[in-house]
Image (tube, rainbow, N blue to C red):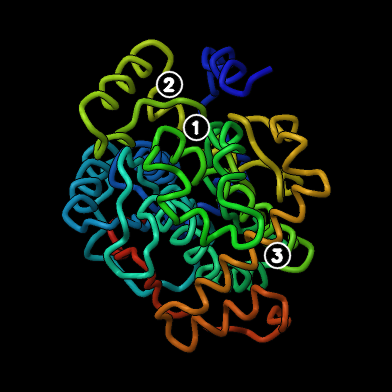
Amino acid sequence: MHPMLRLALTQFHRFPPPSPSPSQLSHLTSATYIITGSNTGLGLETARHLISLGASRVILGVRNISAGETAKASIVESTSCDAEQRARGLERVDGVVCNAGVYMDRWEVAPEGGGEDVSMRVNVAGTMLLSLLVMPKLVEAARRFKGGVAPRMVFVVSTLGFTAKGGLDRAGGEEIWKGLNEEGRYGGRMDFRHGLTKLVEMYAVREFTERFAVEETGVVVNMVCPGLCATGLARDANMLTRAVHGGLRASLARTAEEGSRAVLNAIFTEEETHGKHLAGCAVGEDWIPSWMTDEAGQRTQKQIWKELVDRLEASSLDAHDAALLVWALGEHHPLASGLSWWALTASWKFQHLCHE
């Protein structure tokens, strides 16, 4: 069955409200979470749920600080949480939700140089850079509070990725990342571009979970597809694209709040979901097409990872960041080295916006 038809048939399945266990609820009172793309949509609703459940601190990762402040005010109003004066240094991280992304209907080169498409840089390179930078803090929490609730890293992905194999094939097989960012290979077509970025992200995440095994790190990493949700993802698109999205939202989409329940489930679900694809609130490995898991798919996965990490390592990172990227390549084993925490940089500006 075509993945989009299957998605449409599952859109009417209702997601249950989040139901963390008693031990998880107790853990929340001292836990810190980072959520990117949290000024609207799924990220905002996930943050709202965590605060309502009693999370000690939720950090909103946003590209626009004023939008983040607006999101904070919305959360404060709906949860009666106003703890700004109690802000303190970031002592621990118990969970990260990688939700940030853009939907572009035009080819746009990132202004920082390198000739990369904005959507590929934000949705893939930025997301994976953040995951690499934050992993040491999650490992630290897993060790420090061993025997408690395992830290989580959740990637929000999309079923559209499973429709984008043709776009990936156009990138060529020798230098995939370079090919993905050559406009001439795609003739300026952007109709499948968002799905293509999510496919590349899923390949990278699957390799990430293999390299950072939960048995070694104590950190559970999974990816979740909440289905079609009514969010502002296409707000930067042209009028026609926004109209099409509006029609789909009106007829099929879940609310952002209901979609966020799937994200919460990914945070609270069993450790056995490490490396798994969650379709809504259930493990959905059967959604992963065979061309991603067969021998050729595995070669593609490892090549995407290598090229992506090479690209990140060569970018304008400081020495600490570059050292961590060498770690990700597997040339060193840092799990016993006690890597210290440093400020998150990348392309995201982080603010301590709401906690306890």
**Quarter of the rendering containing residue 291:** top right
Q: Is residue 316 above or below residue 294?
A: below
What is the C-alpha distance between the residues marked 2 and 1?
Answer: 11 Å
Which-is-in-front pick, marks 2 and 1? 2
Question: Are there few (<14), some (14-19), or many (20+) residues within 10 Å of tag 2?
Answer: many
Q: Which residue is mark 3?
A: 212
- Residue 57 appearing in the image: no
Q: Is residue 67 above or below residue 338?
A: above
Please give left or right for residue 311 compared with residue 347 in the image. right
Q: Which residue is mark 1?
A: 261
Q: Which residue is mark 2?
A: 254
Looking at the rendered structure, the kind of residue marked 3 is: Phe
Q: Position of residue 94 (x, y in %)?
A: 54, 60
Report helix, strand or loop for mark 3.
loop
Q: Position of residue 295 (x, y in %)?
A: 83, 49
Callouts 3 and 1 close, C-beta under 8 Å: no
Looking at the rendered structure, the kind of residue marked 1 is: Arg
Q: Is tag 2's residue or tag 1's residue first in the polypeptide sequence?
A: 2
Q: Is residue 33 above or below residue 224?
A: below
In this orientation, which residue lies closer to the viewer: 195 or 209? 195
**Quarter of the rendering containing residue 219:** bottom right
Q: Which residue is pictured at 68% across the width and 52% down the height?
A: 206
Q: Which residue is pictured at 51% across the width and 68% down the height?
A: 134
Q: Which residue is pictured at 61% across the width and 58% down the height?
A: 151
Please give left or right for residue 206 compared with residue 42 in the image. right
- Residue 64 appearing in the image: yes
Question: Are there few (<14), some (14-19), or many (20+) residues within 10 Å of tag 3?
Answer: many
Query: Is the C terminus in the top left, top right, bottom left or bottom right quadrant?
Result: bottom left
Report helix, strand or loop for mark 2.
strand
What is the C-alpha distance between the residues marked 3 and 1?
Answer: 26 Å
